[in-house]
Image (spheres, helix red, strand yellow):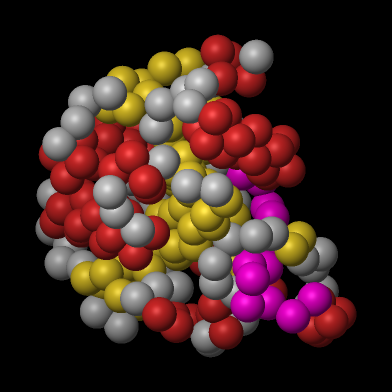
Amino acid sequence: MIRLYRCIPMDYEECLQLQRRLNQERNDGTIGDTIIATEHSDTYTGGIHFKQENATNYSVPILRVERGGNLTYHGKGQLVLYFVFNLKERGINVRDLIEQVQTALNMTLLSYGLESKGRLFKETGVWVGDKKICSIGFAVKGFSTFHGIAVNLNTELSKFFKINPCDMDAGVMTSLAKETGHKVDEMEFLEKMIDYLSKVFEEDIVMEDCVSIKN
């Protein structure tokens, strides 16, 4: 069984410290595989491919973190899922996990009438045609992962224009609301995503309140 904690909203740096703690606990075997579902206020982060000396090129503060990838934006209307999974116990590598998560997201988006495709390497994420709807960046410490994915649901896409997301033109970003032409019920989307993740992982996912994971 996988436990998913719904922590919406949650301060980015508080959530980052929580992920790091859970990663250690997962490596120690004191918890099982865990997902955090959250939303952050405006935050710009740079992954391992971001050069910190380039931070002065932008008008917003850039927080350097240990996930894969380059620059990205987090904000209201975006569903962020962080995966604290023990890869050794699952007998997979981080690329396998990324592909599994991409598959579940593709299935979820198809339920909204959108055909999407997961990409890897420089374009890692999930794309609808030539537009990127989901950014992906994992980190691995010990045998376990943390960080994860950010799906643009009702995201204000203009916020991406303050950076070059993943070293691309900001116009490449899209959202489910933009693609469908109407605002998305974010809880409904999360419930669908949980269902498809459960199918892909072939394991039950139980959603719990955030309070228990913070203690």
The x, y position of residue 95, in whole percent, is: 34, 64
The x, y position of residue 83, in whole percent, is: 44, 43
Residue 196 in sight? no
Q: Quadrant of the N terminus?
A: top left
Magenta highlight: main SS: loop
Total numbered labels: 0
The x, y position of residue 45, in whole percent, is: 68, 62
**Which residue sits at x=17%, y=45%?**
200
**Which residue sits at x=63%, y=67%?**
47
Q: Quadrant of the C terminus?
A: top right
**Which residue sits at x=15%, y=67%?**
115
Question: On the image, which quarter does residue 96 sit in?
Answer: bottom left
Q: Find the magenta span and give its range.
A: 40-52
The x, y position of residue 39, in whole percent, is: 55, 41
Q: Measured along the vertical axis of the image, is residue 190 above or below residue 123?
A: above
User: Image check: 62 left or right of 27?
Assistant: right
**Which residue sits at x=22%, y=50%?**
104
